[in-house]
Image: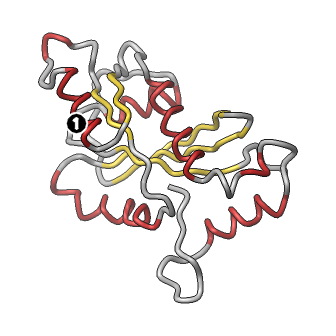
Amino acid sequence: MAKQYDVLFRLLLLGDSGVGKTCLLCRFTDNQFHPAHISTIGVDFKMKTIEVDGIKVRIQIWDTAGQERYQTITKQYYRRAQYAPDGVQKILIGNKADEEHKRQVAREQGLQLAREYGMDFYETSACSNLNIKESFTRLTELVLQAHRKELEGLRGPPRAPTLAGLEEDEQQPLGSEDTPKSCWC
């Protein structure tokens, strides 16, 4: 059976409990919003395929629990990100933009923090679908740019050796002495 994507990336949603990580994920992957949501226990994930610059990208989005009692569990899921060759690609999201009367962080504060850490900043709303697709697409673009050399052959007709190489990377155990440490997170 032929693959329906060119490359697979893992994205992580990190943040405090109750900020709307699960709602962002459900809005992006299923175009649904559930106002009454229970807290995530441990880690959950969903997948979606999007096309960016002619490359079909399968995004595996990990939704981590924000509660402190689950931090030891969630750290295991993003430990591999430290092996990303050009550093981890990040964006800062200020969610619940539709609830202006409950705002706790001014837009200017979010922009300033993003500038300090060299990130893009998006104000989003899972409820009204504000900037959901845009923020996930931008993060995917950043990951693609960071791996531009490995992905050069994907803009034309797909080449099997490149895809096989990506799949081998996916299967390599971390910490092996003989294998280069890489991650497509």
* Residue 19 falls left or right of residue 47: left
Image location of residue 176, percent across then percent down: 52, 85
Residue wearing tag 1? 113
* Residue 132 falls left or right of residue 148: left
Residue at position x 67%, y 56% in the image = 149
Which residue is situated farthest in the bottom direction here? Answer: 177
Numbered disc total = 1
Q: Nearer the viewer, residue 127 or 116?
A: 116
Residue type marked 1: Leu
In the rendered image of this protein, does residue 148 appear above or below residue 27? below
* Residue 8 falls left or right of residue 138: right
In the rendered image of this protein, does residue 156 appear above or below residue 149? above
Q: Residue 116 falls in which quadrant of the image?
A: top left
Image location of residue 133, percent across then percent down: 50, 25
Image location of residue 24, percent across then percent down: 39, 30
Residue at position x 15%, y 19% in the image = 103
Residue at position x 50%, y 42% in the image = 46
Q: Nearer the viewer, residue 49 or 114?
A: 114
Q: For numbered disc 1, what is the local secondary structure?
A: helix
Residue at position x 32%, y 22% in the image = 123
In the rendered image of this protein, does residue 149 appear above or below residue 131? below
Q: Residues within 10 Å of mark 1 (few under 14, many from 20)?
A: some
Image location of residue 85, percent across then percent down: 51, 63
Q: Nearer the viewer, residue 135 or 147?
A: 147
Q: Nearer the viewer, residue 66 or 131?
A: 131
Q: Residue 173 falls in which quadrant of the image?
A: bottom right
